[in-house]
Amino acid sequence: MASRAEIAAAIVRADPAFRAVVANAGLPPTRRPAPVSQRFDALIRSITFQLLATAAANTIHARVIDAIGCTVTPEAIIAAGAEALKGAGLNRAKSEAMVSLAEHVVRGDVRLADHGRLSDAEIVKELTVVKGVGPWTVQMYLMHTLGRRDVWPIGDYGVRVGWSLIHSLPDTISQKELTVAGDPLAGLRSDVAWYCWQAVHFSRATK
């Protein structure tokens, strides 16, 4: 397995436009699979964060935890119900997605304990059967919870903006264009996405 320094160097070799952001941001994060006991909570958190700024999402997620009154588990989400979750600040689609995910886990349709052995594509297929759980939610789970190194979230606006900043593009790159642009970085794309997010942070900090 490549070290973080080797990954950063490989990204710059494959695309020298990343040299400055790699120098400024430092090494990419360590990626290790989370224990099975943390995977459901991570998915619930990803649902909360869909299309929300980080600060707002953190506030709402804390309210979700308060609403269920305990650790985030499938049983606790089902017991709380969609209306209680909606009262915590979620919209109806997200609250219903959380309950549906919990039900899928309890029934065994979503096999969190098996995810360490499944491919990215198999996990995407399994989880996106749940209404309200889309590719972005699963990609964040793959990257941050399962520690997968080659996830390419082309639908993430921050990744698109960051890529465009790094490459000095006049307009934000489209999802279709980003799909192709990322091909030379295959195997490294979770960390490429991370550097794109860092580019956005640096840009905002200088304004």
Image (cartoon, rainbow, N blue to C red):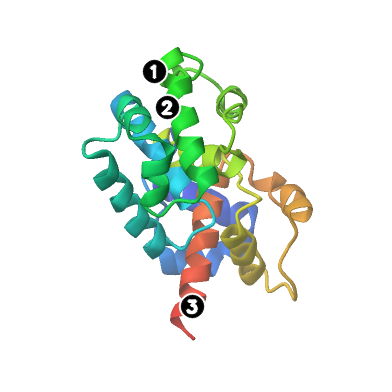
Q: Residue at x 45, y 67 (%)?
A: 23
Query: The residue tagged with tag 2: helix, strand or loop?
Result: helix
Question: Where is residue 31 shown, x and y percent of the image?
Answer: 39, 40
Relative depth, front residue between 25 and 58: 58
Mark nearer the N terminus (3 vs 1): 1
- 54 above or below 50? below
Relative depth, front residue between 191 and 81: 81
Q: Residue at x 30, y 30 (%)?
A: 76
Q: Nearer the viewer, mark 1 or mark 2?
A: 2
Q: Amino acid at mark 2?
A: Ala
Q: Amino acid at mark 3?
A: Arg
Mark nearer the N terminus (1 vs 2): 2
Q: Is residue 33 visible?
A: no
Q: Splitting the image into 4 quarters, where does residue 139 fall? A: top right
Q: Nearer the viewer, mark 3 or mark 1?
A: 1
Question: Where is residue 13 shown, x and y percent of the image?
Answer: 60, 54
Query: The residue tagged with tag 1: helix, strand or loop?
Result: helix
Graded by Cα atoms within 10 Å as few (under 14), some (14 to 19) or many (20 or more), the crowding at tag 2 reads many
Q: Which mark is residue 204?
A: 3
Residue located farthest toward the front when viewing the structure as drawn: 83
What residue does disc 1 label? 113
Work out how far the residue at label 3 is from the one at label 2, CA to CA, in angstroms: 37 Å
Relative depth, front residue between 129 and 153: 129
Residue located farthest toward the left when viewing the structure as drawn: 70
Q: Amino acid at mark 1?
A: Ala
What residue does disc 2 label? 102
Q: Is residue 192 visible?
A: yes
Question: Where is residue 122 shown, x and y percent of the image?
Answer: 59, 22
